[in-house]
Amino acid sequence: MASGKLEKLKIVAFSNADYTEEQGSFTAMLNPETYTIDYKIDYQEGQGQGTSGAQLRFTGIKPQEFAFELLIDSTGIVDGNPRDSVEEDINTLRDLLLKYEGDIHEPKHFKVVWGSLLFKGRCLGLNIATKLFNPDGKPIRAVCKVTFHGSLEDNLRVAEERRSSPDLTHYRVVKQGDTLPLMCYRIYGSSHYYQQVARVNGLTNLRQLQPGMQLFFPPVK
């Protein structure tokens, strides 16, 4: 029978979407019994008038939703550290997940780490169910359901989406130093389409290209 070091699920908070500036963490008292990851794809129905059916057209892949429950107990049975209630632990978890941060003008970004699991995203919600109470009414056990919405750093998202694909429609803002052949090369992998792009944008002279202009790049085969 294989044995190894017990790893606890850990929620690590960051102040930026690149996950480089850590802003605290929360370690599970007990690892979750289960967790769920929800995958969804969006399609658009484009049924024409007078037709009997429609072909679903792909519009996007929704970010994953990741949910699990954490048990928090202050009796000392779990961690050997009895406390009056779980209120302080709950407040710590709630502030980490939901608190609005004035410096970044939004709640934090998160990594959930457990063994081979690594999930990056934002917290959608925290549901707290108290289970046991002291005679004075203070909660001594709680189950906290945490839900995260998947998120990728911009550079990874762009790499996965391959937005430079020539079979997609593109809009680009002209920057200083850009030329139409150069922009076509970046998008299509070839500068040969610059005359076609100039035509669809009503450009009769390439000198009309000015920084700040928005150009339409049609899909090509």
Image: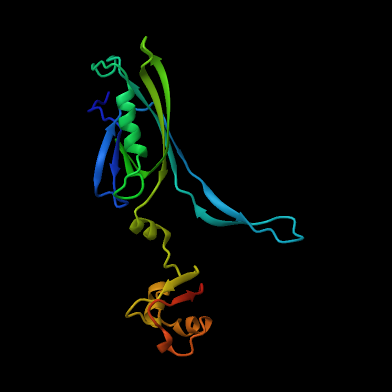
- Between 136 and 218, the one nearer to me in the picture: 136
Q: Is residue 221 visible?
A: no
Front residue of 79 and 138: 138
**Relative vertical location of residue 136 with respect to residue 188 in this rendering, above or below:** above
Q: Position of residue 59 (x, y in %)?
A: 54, 57
Residue at image position (29%, 17%) is 78
Image position, residue 30 (x, y; %): 32, 24
Residue in view at x 37 percent, y 82 percent: 179
| Vertical position of residue 41 compared to residue 99: above or below | below
Q: Which of the pair 217/86 is nearer the observer? A: 86
User: How many dots with numbers?
Assistant: 0
Q: Quadrant of residue 122?
A: top left
Please state if 46 lies on the left or on the right of 123 as rendered.
right
x, y percentage for residue 97? 35, 38
Residue 44 visible to the viewer:
yes
Image position, residue 56 (x, y; %): 61, 55
Residue 26, compared with residue 174, is above or below; it is: above
Note whether 59 is above or below 116 in the view shown. Answer: below
Left or right of 24? Residue 189 is right
Instruction: Name the residue located 37 percent from the left edge and 38 percent from the top edge.
Output: 98
At 33% from the left edge and 43% from the top edge, which residue is drawn? 110
Give the quarter of the image for residue 194: bottom left
Rendered-image quadrant of the N terminus: top left
Asked which colour scheme the image uses, the reply is rainbow
Is 70 displayed left or right of 167 in the figure?
left
Nearer to us in this view, 26 or 89: 89
Find the residue positioned furthest to the right: 50
